[in-house]
Amino acid sequence: MRFAAHSRYLTAFTVLALLMVVLVALPAWAATEDPLTLSESDPADGATGVAVNQKIKLVFSKNVVNMAVAENNEACFKLLNASDAEVPITVVLPDDQVEPERKREIEIVPKANLLPGQTYSVHVAPELKSKSGDTLGEEIVLTFTTSTSALPATGSALTAPAVLMGLALVGAGLGLKRIRR
């Protein structure tokens, strides 16, 4: 009987000792986990000749679009012009349940074309949070300069309204010819 009681104390002591080892090691293990960082951006920091209608794509080291952090993270982005005035933007966070391959990507879309030949800066707040709860911890600032051309760098210079206007004028010309007959 005495041995059984002693054995229970020894088992309890062993469990407590193991628990203490785990609790002491846990902060060290957590500290070695990779922090949340910006992995890449398009345009890259310092880029020049950026199209005036370019979306800004940021890729982070962890999931930053999960619905648990989406509301917080949408408010963590600003686009400023050379005068430090805020440029209106839309922050696009893909749904990581529908597009899991895009869980680390955030797009910043200016609500209007940027001005040609101007320098802009993207500011990412230190409060940007990953699904696992990690934050950036410090502000990230990326700068880029737009192309001196006012025309978008990709696609045709013709816009839908210009094409429609051309078609309307051609149609009107054809109609006039019929009336003259």
Image (cartoon, helix red, strand yellow):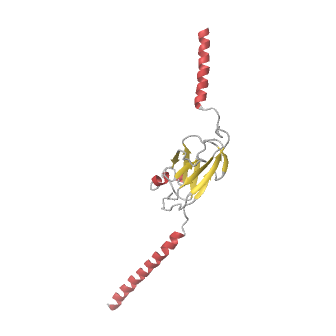
Left or right of 46 in this view: 100: left
Residue lying furthest left in this view? 1
Q: Is residue 179 in view?
A: yes
Residue 94 rendering spot, x and y as whole percentages: 51, 49
Left or right of 17 in this view: 101: right
Q: Nearer the viewer, residue 90 or 21?
A: 90
- The total number of labels drawn is 0
Quarter of the rendering occupied by the N terminus: bottom left
Residue 11 rendering spot, x and y as whole percentages: 39, 83
Quarter of the rendering occupied by the C terminus: top right
Residue 176 rendering spot, x and y as whole percentages: 60, 13
Left or right of 12 in this view: 100: right
Q: Is residue 66 in view?
A: no
Residue lying furthest front in this view? 83
Residue shown at 51% from the left, 56% from the top: 64
Q: Quadrant of residue 118?
A: top right
Q: Quadrant of residue 8?
A: bottom left
Residue lying furthest bottom in this view? 2
